[in-house]
């Protein structure tokens, strides 16, 4: 199941994040879905992008469960793995920043760290 939905409404791309059970922590899948949504907005030649969300928080930051620090049997990611993850997040932030149209965020609740 995708963490996002993408709808076109009157030339506006409405991207809704739905990951309330994790307070919309930025998982690898969510970062990829949001990057794809930004690419799709460019392809659709929209006039604006609206990022919104379900739940009580816009983002609780990075999903630490994916970093391996919460599991007793998990291995600590290598420096290279950490840098790869940072690059993917940077690609998302760059895709948002370089949108040729306004990107609006309807934020309710917390927006922490990468949020």
Image (spheres, rainbow, N blue to C red):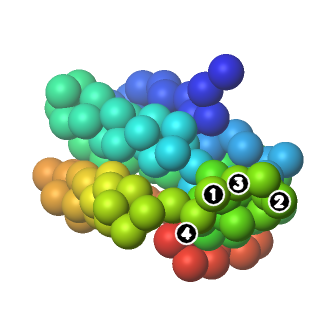
| Residue at disc 4, secondary structure | loop
Crowd tier of the residue under label 1, counting other residues whose Cα lies within 10 Å: few below 14, some 14–19, many 20 or above: few
* Residue 69 sits in quarter: bottom right
Q: Residue furthest bottom?
A: 113
**Which residue position holds label 3?**
74
Specify which label sits upstream in the sequence, 3 or 4. Answer: 3
**Which residue position holds label 2?**
72
| Residue at disc 3, secondary structure | loop
Specify which label sits upstream in the sequence, 4 or 2. Answer: 2
* Residue in the picture at 50% in, 51% down: 51
* Residue in the picture at 29% in, 29% down: 40
- 1 vs 4, front mark: 1
Q: CA distance from mark 1 to mark 4?
A: 26 Å
Specify which label sits upstream in the sequence, 1 or 4. Answer: 1
CB atoms of marks 4 and 2 within 8 Å: no
Q: Position of residue 52 (x, y in %)?
A: 59, 51
Q: Position of residue 95 (x, y in %)?
A: 24, 53
CB atoms of marks 3 and 2 within 8 Å: yes
Above or below — where is 8 with respect to 79? above
Q: CA distance from mark 1 to mark 3?
A: 4 Å
CB atoms of marks 1 and 3 within 8 Å: yes
Q: CA distance from mark 1 to mark 2?
A: 9 Å
Q: Position of residue 54 (x, y in %)?
A: 75, 47
- In the displayed structure, does residue 29 sit left or right of residue 43? right
- In the displayed structure, does residue 99 sit left or right of residue 54? left
Q: CA distance from mark 3 to mark 2?
A: 6 Å
Is residue 114 in view from this perspective?
yes
Q: CA distance from mark 3 to mark 4?
A: 25 Å
**Which residue position holds label 1?**
75
CB atoms of marks 1 and 4 within 8 Å: no
């Amino acid at each position: 199941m995708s963490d996002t939905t993408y709808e076109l409404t009157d030339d506006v791309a409405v991207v809704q994040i739905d990951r309330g059970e994790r307070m919309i922590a930025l998982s690898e899948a969510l970062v990829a879905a949001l990057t794809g949504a930004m690419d799709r907005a460019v392809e659709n030649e929209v006039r604006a992008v609206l990022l919104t969300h379900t739940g009580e928080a816009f983002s609780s930051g990075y999903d630490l469960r994916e970093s391996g620090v919460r599991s007793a049997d998990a291995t600590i990611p290598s420096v290279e793995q950490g840098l790869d993850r940072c690059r993917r997040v940077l690609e998302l932030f760059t895709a948002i920043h370089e949108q040729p149209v306004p990107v609006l965020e309807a934020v309710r609740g917390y927006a922490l760290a990468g949020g």
